[in-house]
Image (spheres, rainbow, N blue to C red):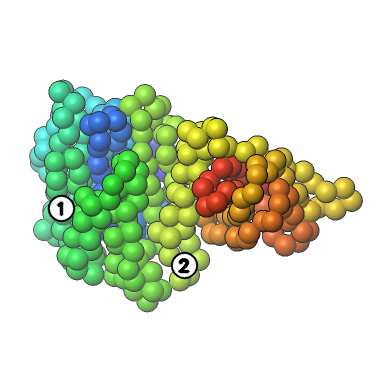
Amino acid sequence: MRTLLFILSLMGWHFTVLAQDTFSIVAVDSATGQVGSAGASCLDNSQILGGVSIIVKVHPGRGAINTQSFWDPTNQNNASGLLLGGSSPTQVIDWLTLNDVTNEPLLRQYGIADFDPNNSPRADAFTGSNCFDFKGQRVGSNYAIQGNILSGPAILDSMEARFLNTPGPLSDKLMAALQGANVPGADTRCLNEGVSSRSTFLMVAKPTDPENNLWLDLRVNQTPFGEEPIDSLQNLYDAWQLTASTNELSAEALEVKVMTLPGSQSLQLSWETRGSANYRMAIFSLEGRQVIDTQVANGVFNIPENQLAAGAYTYRLLKDNLPVAQGKLILP
């Protein structure tokens, strides 16, 4: 559907998605050259293919753009072209408001962060007066936070405080910003479900990443009724972090062997134990839902036949509460 929208927009057809998105952040890190974005919305994959992730465009080494509220693919493509052509976030926003594809700039909301020619960060945002309340934005030297159809300004304030006060890499700060909006009805359309939103994403690119293969690209495009997507994204992020930490801590990493037990469809995971240690095995669905979390007395863990539904899962092994292995499981 996304491809179809793009093709039709080139033919002169224009499509908007009502009030997409609700809350999001774009940011850059001049120390690492990383650029990233995170966001969430009460619209999901059942209403638009990709859910809230349609709003974001991350350009490695250059910047990140979120185009939201009555989202239109042409406005998004124009924003990307301008940024890649050297325009600053403020220049991109000024151009978009003067050249809106349907001449309705006051319905739009934008957030852009990038690097200037001296590799210094810069950011800007725009919130049209006709976006649905509560609407607003928060802009700092290297980030822009924006939202519409919010329960109130506290959502943006909390996202900003979490981003600024969370130590660590850009990905940690973006994930923390989303958690700042993890309250029922942050997007007021989701209040009846008791969740903040229905779809969410987190993306970070290293400077040399291809645009179609970002270093970090996590999406929860749809969740069951009443399930919090930001929590699901947090689980996915925690599992992703394990891969990064395992690669960095190779001296502590363990090799986990996975085999199907003879005469059954039970899976066995085994590893070489090193001295006296407490091991814990956690298994997640691909949506980030934790389905197993248990202590393991030795270097063997069995998943009995039919304990989990057939499909793909990820596992992580912890030794004395430190991650030492991670991988994917396929259950027949």
Residue 72 visible, this orientation? no
Judge whether residue 258 can be spotted in this image.
Answer: yes
Vertical position of residue 3 compared to residue 232: above or below: above
Q: Is residue 33 above or below residue 196?
A: above
Residue 138 tag number: 1
Residue farthest bottom in this picture: 192
Question: In the image, is residue 116 above or below residue 168?
Answer: above
Q: CA distance from mark 1 to mark 2?
A: 28 Å
Judged left or right of residue 302, residue 197 is left
Circle 2: residue type: Glu
In front of the other: 176 or 296: 296
Q: Which residue is mark 2?
A: 227
Q: Indicate the secondary structure of the residue bearing disc 2.
A: loop
Which residue shows up at 83% across the image and 48% down it?
Answer: 261
- Percent across and percent down for residue 1 are 45, 46
Residue 261 versus residue 47 in the image, above or below: above
Furthest residue toward front: 276
Q: Is residue 151 left or right of residue 328?
A: left
Q: Residue at x 35, y 43 (%)?
A: 171
**Foreground: 207 or 136?**
207
- Amino acid type at mark 1: Arg
Q: Residue at x 39, y 54 (%)?
A: 200
| Residue sitting farthest toward the right | 263
User: How far from the left and from the top, in percent, is residue 278?
Assistant: 61, 53
Nearer the observer, 8 or 186: 186
Of callouts 1 and 2, which one flags the residue occurring earlier in the amino acid sequence? 1
Q: Secondary structure at mark 1?
A: strand
Residue at the image point whose x is 89% and y is 51% from the top: 263
* Relative image position of residue 314 (x, y in whole percent): 59, 48
